Structure formats: structure tokens, C-alpha cells
Amino acid sequence: MEIISIKKTIVALVTAPVTQNVALVRISGSLSYSIIAKIFDRSLPKYSQKEPRLIFGRIIDSQQKIVDEVLLLCFYKPRSFTGEDVVEISCHGNLFVVNQILQLILENGAELAQAGEFTKQAFFNRKLNLVQANAINDLIRAPSLEGTRLALHNLSSESQKELEVIENELLDVIATIKVNIDYPEYDGVEYLTGKKVLPRLTKLVEKLKSVKESGKKAGVFQEGLKVAIVGKPNVGKSTLLNALLQEEKAIVSPIAGTTRDIVEARYNLNGVPLTLLDTAGIHETKDIVEKIGVERSLQALEKAKIIFFLVDNSCPWSQAEESIFQKIKDKNHLVIINKIDQENKLQLPNYICSVENSRFSHKKILKISAKNKQLAELETKINELFASDLINNLSPYPYLSQSWQQAKLTKLIQQLETVVSELKKETYLDALCGDLEVSYKLVKELSGKEYNEDLLDIIFSKFCLGK
Ligand SMILES: Nc1nc2c(ncn2[C@@H]2O[C@H](COP(=O)(O)OP(=O)(O)OP(=O)(O)O)[C@@H](O)[C@H]2O)c(=O)[nH]1
Ligand SMILES: [Mg+2]
């Protein structure tokens, strides 16, 4: 594998900028060893080392004053995370010490690394592809254990190989068609007819659709799921929040209009990381403060990925509920009938059951008693919607959950579907070569074999400093 020489040598504090027992400073680039040689009191091992080396010694300033006692972990190009010469300095975690070490390294020719720049070096040196680079960030930031597992899966070479199978399949079809066109007399290559290509591409489209769908589902584990609990006043929204969290986070009272502001809390429901927003009851009111609260509830409703629309089993359906339903009916929502421990006076209008919305359409009316902590139907539903199949059966493909990955997959699927429909019309294969090449380019963009600088900047800017 060819390693591109990157001139810039970068340095950053890898650990958090707080007082701690040990801090880690990483330096990567062609100047790493010459810089370290100037600020370390012991001679470094011969450059030809292949295996990483651990060396104890002292960092010294230009006046030979001791700055700290440290451990150096030395990696040699190309056998390092970035593919460059890398030295990791484990020093004492006092920020005065850390800053002095950083300063010395900067004075001797390194530059301060930008967010994600070490991983960017690794990407340019082909130590990892773009899916794996994203996976590193997900592994660090995932808001649940399941999210970290999916990130590790994306990091694995096995899942990358599956992505390559898709790439190679497309390449094979394109190459064979081209040979057929350019060298019709060459009979060492299979002659591809539309009939032969059609099932291959149809299968590919199916595969890509499942990659897209599982990526979309995985996004929940990487980014969390914002849920707004809405309803008219007094239906038990705050009681539901508290019951899920198993703590008295929000004030509960029998007085309608208790919650005035959004109460936000994180909650991990069987591995599904939820950000719950308890909101003020939505209804017509003249009270100025309550009015502001209702405004905020409506904003939360817009921002949320899912709405838990709470209704009260012990009250008839109301005008306030009718108008809330009109606002949420086109969004992903679950209708949750609370207070089932009380006598039933609620009759849901028929149309509530018939409104279809994506995967929430079937069995979306649930019954709970928040006060008695009877939440089984809700827990099972969330699990069924987001978790079970993902966690139990890992996809062989990487989970492409980022919005840019989903957008590229959508384009790719559309592109290939156009080719498939043309093939059904018996359009000549050579007329479809251009479309197939566009598809091939899209697959390469997913893995980062082809990239655009602006997208790279966006991707790596989401990383922490020092990664
Ligand atoms: N019987 C019964 N009462 C409940 C249940 N859930 C909530 N309540 C009661 O309903 C009342 C209102 O509960 P809250 O959780 O404050 O209702 P809310 O929807 O947050 O109300 P606002 O903040 O005013 O919009 C309280 O007296 C709760 O104890 C339930 O499942 N069963
Ligand atoms: Mg409340």
C-alpha cells in the first residue's frame, strides 16, 4: 500500500483539557522524532524500528530544565494509527505541565491539530476508509452501548469487505459490458446481454435497500431519538416522564397546567437512547406564562423525531386533543392512552386509528398507567420499532446512518432502478453504461475512494480535538 507523505506534523492534547492523573499528548508527522529528540533527555531507539516502543524519560525545555517525567509510546511510519511517525506522550495531567509540553512541541515545528485531523491523516494514508473514519467518531460519541457495538462493526474489515463486494459487482458488470462493446471479437469474456444483467442489478438494488434501511435504524443508536411527550393538560405527561426515569424529575400535580417549561431528560430504553421532552399541556389559554409554555411545547413537537401523544382514559375526547392531533398526524407518533387504571370515558375518534404514517402505522395505540408504572406496551413497542432486529442480527454490511450516507444511498438506488427499468424495456446495454458508471462513482464515494474536500471538512469537523 502506497503511503502518501504528508509534510505537516501535528500535535494535540488527546485527553480532556482538565486536571487529571495522566494526560496524553499525540504528535504525528514526518518531524515527530526530530522534535522529540530536542525535548527529551534520552536518546530515541533507531528509526528502523517496526514494533512500537515504550520509553521512560524526561521532557526538558531549551534551558535543560525538567518539565515532566513521561512515558513515550513510539510508532514508526507506516505502522501507526495515522500512517505517519507518531509519538504519544503520557505525562502528568496538570494543565501547566501539559501546556508547557505542547508549547515546546509547537516551538520546534509542529502545528496544532484541528478536530479530527489525526483521523484525516489516517484516511489520506489509506489506513481506514471513510466509513471506518466515521465509525471512530461514532464509537467515541455513541449515546448507548448498542451504538458503540454498531460503530465497532463499522470499523471492522469484515463489514468493509461486504461493501467492496457491492463495488466489485458493479465494476464487473461495467467492465464486461465495455469489453463486449470495445472488443466484440474477444471471446475470452462472457457476452453480457440485458437479460443476464437484469437479475444481477435487481439483486444489487435489493441489497442496497436493505443497507439503507438498516443504516436508518442504526442512526437512532448513534444520534439518539428525540421524543416529545405532548397532550392536553393533566393527562399524565410528567408522570410518564418520571415513571420512565424512575425518579421525580418533573413536578406532578392534579392541577392542570403544572408544567410550564420543557423538562428534558435522557433515558436508555432497552438500549434505545431517548431524549425525552416533557412539555406543557397544549390548550387555549389566556395566562401569559402558560401561553409561552404552550409555544415551547409546539416548538418541541416540531423538533422531535417521535411524538408520544398522551390522552386520558378517564376523560372524553376534547377539542384541544383534536387540534393537537391535527398538528402531529403527519409526523411519527404513538397515541398513548394513559390512566387505564381508571374508569373508561374516552372514545377515540375512528380516524385516529386509520391515519397511516410509515412504520408507526400498525398497532400505534398503546395503553398504559403511568402512575402505576404499567408501561409494558410502550416499552415493547419502542423495542420492536427500533431495537430488536438490529441488535440481535448484525447486518454483514456497515451501518450507513449518517445523513450524507443515506442521501448517497438514495441516489444510488434511484440510479440503479432507472437502469433496471430501462433493461426491462430492452434498452441496449451500451446506452446504460453511463448510468452504471455514475452508480459506481457513488459507491466509491461511500467508502471515500472518491471524495470531495467540502464533505471531508464537514465529516472531520464533527470529531473531537485530538482524534
Ligand atoms: N389514576 C391515574 N392517575 C394518573 C396517572 N398518570 C397521572 N395521573 C395523575 O394525573 C394528574 C396529572 O398528572 P401530571 O403528570 O402532572 O399531568 P401532566 O400531563 O404533566 O399535566 P400538565 O403538566 O399540567 O400538562 C396527577 O394527579 C397524576 O397523579 C395514571 O396512570 N393513573
Ligand atoms: Mg406536566
Image: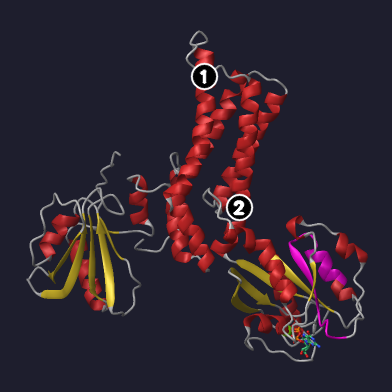
Q: Quickly name the residue at label 2.
A: 214
Name the residue: 68% across, 20% down: 427
Visible in this render: residue 143? no
Specify the quadrant of the image occupied by residue 20. bottom left
**Please, what is the three-letter code of the amino acid marked with disc 1?**
Lys
Between 311 and 105, the residue placed more toward the observer is: 311
Name the quadrant of the C terminus: bottom left
CB within 8 Å, label 1 to label 2: no
Residue 351 part of the magenta-drawn span: no
Q: Residue furthest front?
A: 392
Ligand 2 visible in quadrant? bottom right
Specify the quadrant of the image occupied by residue 366. bottom right
Name the residue: 38% across, 48% down: 128
**Please, what is the three-letter code of the amino acid marked with disc 2?**
Ser
Question: What stretch of residues is rendered in magenta?
Answer: 322-342
Residue 333 part of the magenta-drawn span: yes
Q: Quickly name the residue at label 1.
A: 178
Please tell me whether residue 239 is drawn above or below residue 116 in the rendered image.
below
Within 8 Å of ligand 1, the CB of disc 1? no
The x and y percentages for residue 98 are 24, 73
